[in-house]
Image (tube, grey):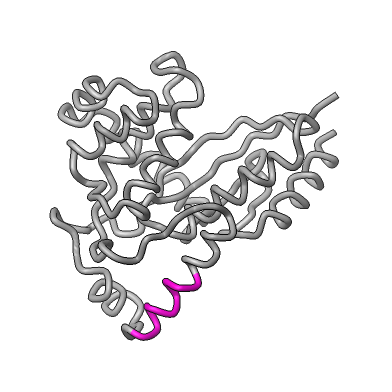
């Protein structure tokens, strides 16, 4: 008899460690197989909620926010690239020199997770497609045209996606979810919350996710 776990994956699509964390989590679940069933909900978090239209140069942004030098930034990006490569996720360094506002992407993700609104599984597919669009293809995730097209790649109706984006729908719901998770102490991502009780922080290796999920499932059983 399998155990079902609820997983809230709190993340931002402009966060490279979130791409690493989601890839590692999925591979851990593949290793576990049918022994554990999961109900995954992708929750919003904005690393840069005040990011203006048009975004900002990444090196400039990181220097302002963290005080990192261009050399430190380059070393971190190479570490991230290598971690992604190990998991089969491509971080293309060339052509991705800006960071953007992601609020509309989170509105679209909220829509894609509404029960009965779109086909099951589309939220995760959209999340992965958005991460690929930004980190691999260097596209602008604040552009409605990009978001609608990526929605189509994920199996959603691009026209419906554009209507959601143009209408401003789900803005209140996204802000409420963001406020909830920051209110319970989530200030860095990815944050993987299991059964609303257990926290796995950061882009952990596959083995760490697998061991933690097996342990939590055993306790739940």
Residue 91: give x, y in percent of width and height. 42, 59
Please, is residue 78 above or below residue 91 in the view?
below
Residue 202 is at least partly visible in this image: no
Of residue 103 and residue 13, the one placed in the foreground of this image is: 13
Residue closer to the observer: 197 or 111: 111
How many numbered discs, if any? Answer: 0
Q: Is residue 1 above or below residue 29?
A: above
Q: Examine the structure image and report whether residue 82 is included in the region drawn in magenta.
A: no
Of helix, strand and loop, which mostly describes the magenta segment? helix
Residue at 74 percent across and 49 percent down: it is: 210
User: What residue lies at 45% left-to-right and 27% top-to-bottom?
Assistant: 122
Q: Residue at x 36, y 86 (%)?
A: 71
Q: Is residue 181 above or below residue 74?
A: above
Image x and y of residue 67, in percent:
33, 83
Q: Quadrant of residue 32?
A: top right
Q: Position of residue 148 (x, y in %)?
A: 24, 31
Quadrant of the rendering where the N terminus is positioned:
top right
Q: Residue at x 21, y 58 (%)?
A: 51
Residue numbers of the magenta segment? 71-79
Q: Is residue 76 magenta?
A: yes
- Left or right of 5, for residue 52: left
Q: Give left or right: position of 94 versus 201.
A: left
Position in image of residue 208 (x %, y %): 71, 57
> On the picture, is 170 further left or further right than 166?
right
Residue 201 appears in the rendering: yes
Left or right, residue 113 beside residue 101: right
């Amino acid at each position: 008899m399998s155990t079902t776990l609820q997983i809230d994956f709190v993340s931002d699509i402009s966060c490279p460690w979130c791409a690493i964390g989601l890839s590692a989590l999925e591979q851990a679940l593949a290793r576990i197989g049918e022994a554990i069933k999961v109900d995954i909900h992708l929750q919003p978090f904005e690393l840069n909620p005040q990011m203006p239209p048009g975004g900002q140069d990444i090196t400039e942004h990181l220097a302002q926010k963290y005080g990192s030098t261009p050399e430190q930034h380059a070393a971190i990006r190479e570490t991230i690239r290598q971690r992604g490569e190990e998991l089969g996720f491509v971080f293309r360094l060339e052509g991705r020199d800006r960071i953007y506002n992601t609020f509309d992407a989170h509105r679209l993700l909220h829509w894609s997770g509404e029960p009965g609104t779109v086909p099951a599984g589309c939220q995760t597919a959209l999340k992965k497609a958005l991460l690929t669009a930004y980190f691999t293809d260097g596209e602008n995730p604040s552009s409605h045209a990009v978001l609608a097209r990526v929605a189509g790649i994920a199996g959603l109706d691009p026209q419906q996606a554009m209507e959601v984006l143009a209408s401003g729908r789900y803005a209140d719901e996204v802000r409420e979810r963001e406020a909830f998770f920051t209110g319970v102490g989530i200030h860095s991502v990815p944050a993987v919350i299991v059964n609303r009780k257990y926290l796995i922080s950061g882009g952990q290796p596959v083995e760490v996710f697998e061991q933690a999920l097996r342990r939590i499932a055993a306790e739940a059983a």
